[in-house]
Image (spheres, coloured by chain):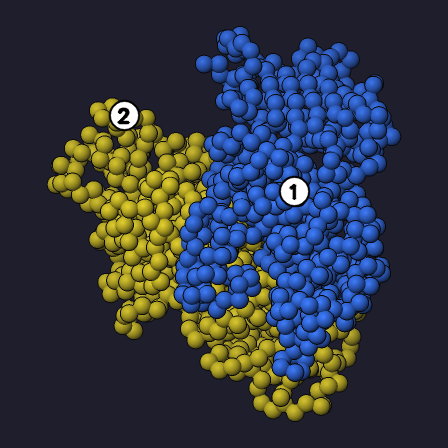
Chain colours: A yellow, B blue
C-alpha cells in the first residue's frame, strides 16, 4: 500500500515507500487525501503528488505573472493576495530572515496570470462570469491561470486550502495540478435582515465564509413585514418609521456600499430582495397609503394588508423606489419576491372590490396579484435590470421576461397534501423526514397555513415535489434556482447536513435543455429564530454542504468522504475566525476562541 | 385603566392617573409589568408600586447593614456587590460628581443584611442551603435580608433585574417588596466536556448565565467515551492518553479549582460526574487493564467494553481515583453515572463468563452490573460523599443509600414502544412531538438503540412515562431529579422553549410525601453537536425556561406572560455579554456585539 499518510510524518520515510504516479485521482474515481489537506468544495479535476515543498513566510510571495493582464494596480487582487497570505501564514509566530539561498524543496512564489484582455479588476461578477481557473503547484513556482480576477479568487482559495502544516509545524504543499470550474453559475446564500437586524460585522463575516466555500451570490432579503432597515434616500421615512430603530437598526447608504464592495472583492454578487406586494407591513409605517386598508364589514379594521394594487400612487411610488434601488445595487438582477400574498384583506376592501369589477377579474384575486406583479415587472424592466421572483409568480402565470430567474422554495406536494388533509377536517401528524421538514412545529407553520395552534399534520411522503416545479419552470424555458431542500433555518437534531448534501437541483425528469436552465441554488437562512447570537454557527458548515453540491461535479456525493473533508474544512473555518459548529463528536487542533 | 406603562414615559403624567394600591400582584393572580422591568425567574411574592426612585452611579452604594453578620471581609459578597453594581451601571458613560444634596426621589443605597450567625462567606452551597431572601426597595434605602450569603446572591440578582432605564436613560427602580425562595433545592445545568472540549472561558460564561437565572448546580459531565480532559494527579496518564490533546484539551487542577471557586462565588455547586462502568472508552487509553477485553470467538477482537468488574485491580483503581475526586470536588455529592451499559462485550469475554459462574449470576448480566455498582458505591461511601446516579441504577435494583439522588432521563414508555415495534421487525416513523423527541434522527439515535441506519421509528404517544419513573423512585423513598423533558441538546424548529417550560417535575401520581422527594431537575446539554461555537446560544434562553420552572411557584405557567418576560430577560443577558438566541422575531435595544 502506498501510504501517503506516512509521508507527512517525516521526509525521511520517503525513500522507504515506492509510490508511482498520482495518488489522488479525478472525482469520479476513489482518491485519498493526506490527513492535513481537505479541499472543499472538491475541484472538478485535481491531481496531487507525494512530492512536497515548504513555504516560508519570509520569502513566499504571491504576485502577478509577467504576461498577466492584471498588475499591482488591480486592488481587488492585491487585497486577495494579502488575505490569502494571512490565511496561510497568520498562525506562524516567528518569521525568519529571508535567506539568500533557496532550499531545495521550497516553493517561493505563486504567480497569478490573468489571460483575458480585461481582467475585470473594477467590475462586478455576474451570472455569466467565467470562474474557471488552472492551478499548477511545482517547484519553485506555482502558477494560477484564470481568464479574469473572479477565477483567480477561486484559485487562490484552493491554493490556500492545499497548504498545511507538517508534523513539525512547517508550512507545506504538495506538487499539485488543479483544473476547476463551477457546476452551477448561481450559488447563493439568503440572509434575512428584517425579522432580526444583523449588524454589519455579522454580514461581512458571513461574506468572508461564503468566499471560503466559493459561494458567489449574497441574496439579501433586506426588508419584510417585521422591519425595514434599508435606508432609502428617496423615501427616508421607510426606515425612519419602519426599522426596529431608526439609528441603531438600519443600513445606511454607506453600509450598503460597504457590503457590496466587500462582496465584490470576494467575487460575490449582492442581489437585494424587495418583496412585494405581500410581506410589506413595515413599508406601510413610513409610506401611508401604500398598503391596502383592511375592512371589518363596512368600516376599516385598523389593520393593513398587501400593497394596494388599485391605486396609481402605488405604481408612482414603486417607480421612484426601484429607480433608486437599481442605482444602489449594481447587480444586473433585482429580486422582486412575489411570494405568499394573502387575499383576505383585498377581499374585504370595497375599493379593491370595485377595481376587480372594473378590470373584469371576477372573484379571482390571483388575477389582481398578477396585474400588480406585471406592472411592477414593467417598472423594473425600464431600469434595465433583470429580475428574480419566487415560484408563485410563475405558478400564477405572470408574463415574464425570457431571462427571468424563478426561485423554487415550496414543496407543492406536501402543501397539497396538507390542504387535502386539513380541508377534510382531520388533525394529522407531521413527521417531517429529511427533506420535508420545512413545514414544522411552531409559529412558522401556523403562519403559512393558518391552521389551529394545536393542529398536527402528518406528512410522510419521501419524494418531495419541488422536482415537478423545477421541471415545469424549465419546460417553460425559464431559469430555475432551487431552495426547497436548503431552508437552513429549519433545524433538526443530528447530522442534517447529510440530507442537505444529497439534494440535487438537476435531479428531476427533464431534457438536457431543461437541465441547462437550472442555474443553481440558494441556501436560505430565514430570520425568525436567528440573529447575531446564533446565525454563523447555524449557517456553517451546513451551508458548506450546499456549496459543494453547487460547485463540484454531480458525481461527488459520497457521504463518508464528504464527512472527512468537511470536518477538516470546518476546523479551517474556525482557524480563520468563523464559528462554524461541529458536525459530530470530535475536536479541532485550534478551537474557536470566542464565546 | 391604571396605565402604569404611561408612568415610565414621563413623571409629568403621574398626576393624571389615579392609581391606588399595588399594580403587581402575587403570581396566582394577573399582574402587569412595566415595559422596562422583567423578573426572571418570577419571585414567589412580589409587589411593586408606581413610585419610582433614581439611582446615580456616583452615589449609589451596596453595603453591609450595620447588624449584618457579614462585613467587608466577606469577599464573596464584596465580589457580588461589584458584579451587580456593574450590571446596573456598566452602560452609563458619564458619571456625575457626587452631589451633596440627595434629590427627593433618589435611592442611595442597598443594605445587605445577613441574619444567621454564620454568613457562610467561605463555605459552599449545598442541597440544604436556604436561598430565601427578602428585598424591600424604598427611599432612601433598599434592604436585602437573607440568612446567609446564598440567599443574598439571589436577592442581588433580583435587585439588579428591578433596575431599568427610563425614557431619558435615567437609572430607575420602583418601590418594591419581594419575598422569595426557590420551589426546588436542586436546579442544575449539565454540560458535557468529553464529546467536545469546552474552553474554560465558555464554562465560566455559562456559570455567569446560570447565576442570572438562579441555577445552583453545575453538573459537570467531565469525561466520557470520547475524551478524558480531567487531569488527575493520581493517574496523570488518564488525560495524557485519553484527552483529545494532553495540553490544549485538558482541565488542569488549577482550571478545576477556578471553575469551582467561580461557581461558589455565584452560589453554584459543582457536581462532577465520573460515569462508569459504561461510557469509559477514553479511560482505557491511559489505564490499561481497566476495560473489558472484547472477544471475537475465542480471540480478543482488539476492542474494549465497559470497565472490567471481575478484577480486584479495578476496585483498587477506583478506590484511589475516587479518593482523589472526593478531595478535588468539595460538594457533598459525586455523580457516578451508571447509565447505558452494553453487555455484549462482557458476554464475549471468557474471564467474565467464568466470573459470572463463580458469582452465580447465571446469564443475567444486569446482576454483574449491579455487583460492580454496589462495590463502587461502597468505595465512594467510604469517602463520606453522597452520590447521584442515573435512573438505570435504581431500575436494576442496586441497594442505594437513603440520601441517594436518582436522576431520571429516560422515557421508558417510548423506549418500550420502540423495542416492541422494532422487535416485531417493523420499520416505523418517529414523529417526535414536544416531549418525546429525545429519540430522534441522526447518530445519537443509532447509538442508543443499535438500529439500522435507515430505520424509521414512529412514536406518537403524547404522555411520556418519565412520570411513572418519578413515582416509582419516590415511592421507594429516594430523591428524584428530572431531566427527561430538558435534554436541550435535542432541537427542533420553532419555539421549543414552550414545551420545555410546561414540563413539571411534580406532575405525576403520588402522595405529598413523594412529591417532597423531588428535589428538582437539570437541563442537559449533551455534547455531540455543540462546542464553543454554538453552545451558549443553544443553551440560553431555552435553559431559562427550566430555571423558572424550578424556582417559581408551580402556578407560574402562563405562556404569554412568560414570553413577554423571557424576551426581555434574554435582551438583558445579551447586554451582560451572554449570546442568548432570540425566541422569535424582534429585536433588543442593545444587540449582541460579538459574532
Dividing the picture into quarters, in which one does residue B576 lie? top right
- Give the residue pinned by disc 2: A300
Please name whichever residue, A510 or A55, is drawn nearer the observer in this view of the structure: A510
Dividing the picture into quarters, in which one does residue A85 lie? bottom right
Q: Are marks 1 and 2 on the same chain?
A: no
Between marks 1 and 2, how big is the CA–CA gap? 64 Å
Residue B334 place in picture, x, y as percent: 74, 50
Residue B496's place in the image compared with B560, above or below, is below
- Mark 2 residue element: strand
Residue in the picture at 30% in, 37% down: A307
Residue B66's place in the image compared with A456, above or below, is above
Residue B2 place in picture, x, y as percent: 48, 14
The residue carrying pointer 2 sits among few (fewer than 14), some (14 to 19) or many (20 or more) residues within 10 Å by Cα, namely few
- Give the residue pinned by disc 1: B477
Residue in the picture at 28% in, 30% down: A293
The residue carrying pointer 1 sits among few (fewer than 14), some (14 to 19) or many (20 or more) residues within 10 Å by Cα, namely some
* Mark in the foreground, 1 or 2: 1
Dividing the picture into quarters, in which one does residue B403 lie? top right
Left or right of residue A285, residue B374 in this image: right
Residue B139's place in the image compared with A270, above or below, is above
Figure disc tally: 2
Q: Is residue B476 visible?
A: yes
Residue A198 place in picture, x, y as percent: 52, 44
- Mark 1 residue element: loop
- Kindly identify which chain the residue marked by label 2 belongs to: A
- Kindly identify which chain the residue marked by label 1 belongs to: B
Amino acid at each position: 500500500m502506498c501510504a501517503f499518510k506516512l509521508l507527512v510524518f517525516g521526509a525521511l520515510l520517503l525513500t522507504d515507500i515506492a509510490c508511482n504516479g498520482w495518488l489522488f485521482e479525478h472525482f469520479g474515481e476513489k482518491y485519498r487525501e493526506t490527513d492535513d489537506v481537505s479541499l472543499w468544495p472538491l475541484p472538478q479535476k485535481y491531481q496531487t503528488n507525494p512530492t512536497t515543498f515548504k513555504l516560508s513566510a519570509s520569502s513566499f510571495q504571491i504576485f502577478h505573472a509577467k504576461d498577466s493582464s492584471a498588475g499591482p494596480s488591480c486592488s481587488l487582487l492585491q487585497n486577495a493576495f494579502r488575505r490569502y497570505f494571512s490565511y496561510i501564514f497568520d498562525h506562524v509566530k516567528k518569521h525568519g530572515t529571508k535567506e539568500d539561498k533557496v532550499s531545495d524543496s521550497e516553493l517561493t512564489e505563486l504567480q497569478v496570470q490573468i489571460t483575458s484582455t480585461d481582467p475585470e479588476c473594477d467590475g462586478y461578477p455576474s451570472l455569466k462570469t467565467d470562474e474557471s481557473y488552472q492551478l499548477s503547484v511545482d517547484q519553485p513556482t506555482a502558477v494560477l491561470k484564470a481568464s479574469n480576477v473572479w477565477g483567480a479568487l477561486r484559485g487562490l482559495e484552493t491554493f490556500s486550502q492545499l497548504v498545511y502544516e507538517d508534523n513539525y509545524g512547517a508550512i507545506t504543499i504538495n506538487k499539485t495540478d488543479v483544473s476547476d470550474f463551477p457546476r452551477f453559475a448561481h450559488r447563493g446564500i439568503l440572509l434575512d435582515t428584517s425579522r432580526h437586524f444583523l449588524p454589519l460585522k455579522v454580514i461581512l463575516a458571513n461574506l468572508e465564509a461564503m468566499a471560503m466555500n466559493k459561494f458567489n451570490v449574497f441574496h439579501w432579503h433586506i426588508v419584510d413585514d417585521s422591519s425595514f432597515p434599508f435606508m432609502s434616500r428617496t423615501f427616508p421615512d421607510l426606515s425612519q418609521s419602519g426599522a426596529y430603530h431608526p439609528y441603531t437598526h438600519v443600513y445606511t447608504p454607506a453600509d450598503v456600499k460597504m457590503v457590496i464592495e466587500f462582496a465584490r472583492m470576494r467575487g460575490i454578487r449582492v442581489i437585494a430582495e424587495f418583496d412585494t406586494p405581500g410581506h410589506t407591513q413595515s413599508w406601510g409605517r413610513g409610506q401611508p397609503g401604500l398598503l391596502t386598508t383592511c375592512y371589518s364589514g363596512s368600516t376599516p379594521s385598523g389593520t393593513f394588508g398587501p400593497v394596494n394594487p388599485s391605486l396609481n400612487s402605488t405604481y408612482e411610488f414603486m417607480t421612484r423606489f426601484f429607480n433608486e434601488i437599481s442605482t444602489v445595487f449594481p447587480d444586473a438582477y433585482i429580486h422582486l419576491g412575489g411570494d405568499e400574498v394573502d387575499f383576505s384583506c383585498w377581499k374585504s376592501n370595497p375599493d379593491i372590490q370595485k377595481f376587480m369589477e372594473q378590470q373584469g377579474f371576477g372573484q379571482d384575486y390571483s388575477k389582481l396579484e398578477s396585474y400588480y406583479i406585471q406592472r411592477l415587472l414593467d417598472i423594473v424592466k425600464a431600469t434595465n435590470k433583470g429580475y428574480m421572483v419566487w415560484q408563485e409568480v410563475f405558478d400564477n402565470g405572470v408574463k415574464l421576461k425570457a431571462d427571468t430567474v424563478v426561485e423554487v422554495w415550496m414543496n407543492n406536494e406536501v402543501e397539497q397534501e396538507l390542504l387535502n388533509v386539513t380541508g377534510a377536517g382531520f388533525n394529522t401528524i407531521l413527521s417531517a423526514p429529511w427533506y420535508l421538514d420545512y413545514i414544522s412545529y411552531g409559529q412558522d407553520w401556523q403562519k403559512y397555513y393558518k391552521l389551529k395552534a394545536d393542529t398536527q399534520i402528518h406528512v410522510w411522503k419521501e419524494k418531495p415535489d419541488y422536482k415537478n416545479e423545477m421541471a415545469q419552470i424549465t419546460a417553460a424555458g425559464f431559469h430555475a434556482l432551487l431552495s426547497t431542500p436548503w431552508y437552513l433555518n429549519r433545524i433538526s437534531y443530528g447530522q442534517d447536513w447529510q440530507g442537505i448534501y444529497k439534494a440535487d437541483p438537476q435531479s428531476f425528469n427533464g431534457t438536457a435543455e431543461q437541465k441547462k436552465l437550472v442555474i443553481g441554488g440558494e441556501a436560505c437562512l430565514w430570520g425568525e429564530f436567528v440573529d447575531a447570537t446564533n446565525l454563523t454557527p447555524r449557517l456553517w458548515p451546513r451551508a458548506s454542504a450546499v456549496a459543494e453540491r453547487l460547485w463540484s461535479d454531480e458525481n461527488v456525493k459520497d457521504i463518508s468522504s464528504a464527512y472527512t473533508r468537511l470536518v477538516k474544512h470546518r476546523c479551517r473555518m474556525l482557524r480563520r475566525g468563523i464559528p462554524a459548529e461541529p458536525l459530530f463528536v470530535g475536536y479541532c487542533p485550534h478551537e474557536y476562541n470566542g464565546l
